[in-house]
Amino acid sequence: MQEMPPYGYGYSGEYGPRPAPSLEQKVTKRLGIALLIFTAAFGLTMAVVVGQRLSDQALAVIAGAVCGVVASIPPSLLIIWVTKRKQERPQAWAGPYPPVVVVQPPLGYPAGDANRYLQPPMMGSSMAQPIPREFIVVGEE
């Protein structure tokens, strides 16, 4: 008999609703959000103060660097996505090694005929002597 899948609210295989977060978890989450807002406000204020004191050329250099970094983010994410996708794809398993096949002469042949069975074929008379090759050297007088 097959085992039935669990039904219900089911988080990590348990039944019933999730437990309510504790007071400590709520405070930690709110503290993290407040710290994030404070950091963003501080960074924005520093950017405005420094931006007012820099020359136009320095601002152009900084703007170019920021635009370059922002332009490199999509290709980087694309490369990461493609490499993760290749890693997630299961590798095809070839299975066990193919069997080793040994070719032997048929049984019942005498020793002399068995040796002839494995010898290479005879070469014709045209193959006995190699054909001389002709070379042309360019630039020779």
Image (spheres, rainbow, N blue to C red):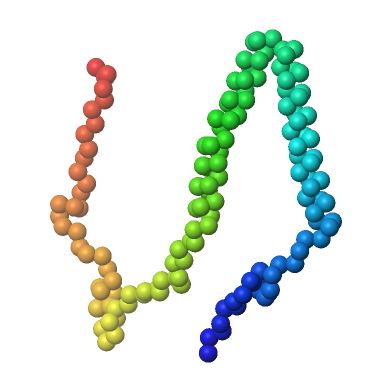
Residue at 74% x, 33% y: name it. Answer: 40
Q: From the viewer's side, name the closer residue of 6 and 65.
A: 6
Count of labels shown? 0
Left or right of 14 on screen, residue 83: left
Name above or below for residue 24 compared with residue 15. above
Left or right of 134 on screen, residue 9: right
Name above or below for residue 102 compared with residue 138. below
Residue at 79% x, 47% y: name it. Answer: 30
Left or right of 17 on screen, residue 111: left
Report if residue 110 is visible in the image: no
Which quarter of the picture shows residue 123? bottom left
Name above or below for residue 54 compared with residue 45. above
* Image location of residue 38, percent across then percent down: 79, 35
* Image location of residue 50, percent across then percent down: 75, 18
Name above or below for residue 36 compared with residue 99. above
Quarter of the image with the C terminus is: top left
Q: From the viewer's side, name the closer residue of 101 and 79.
A: 79
* Image location of residue 58, percent across then percent down: 67, 13
Q: From the viewer's side, name the closer residue of 75 and 86.
A: 75
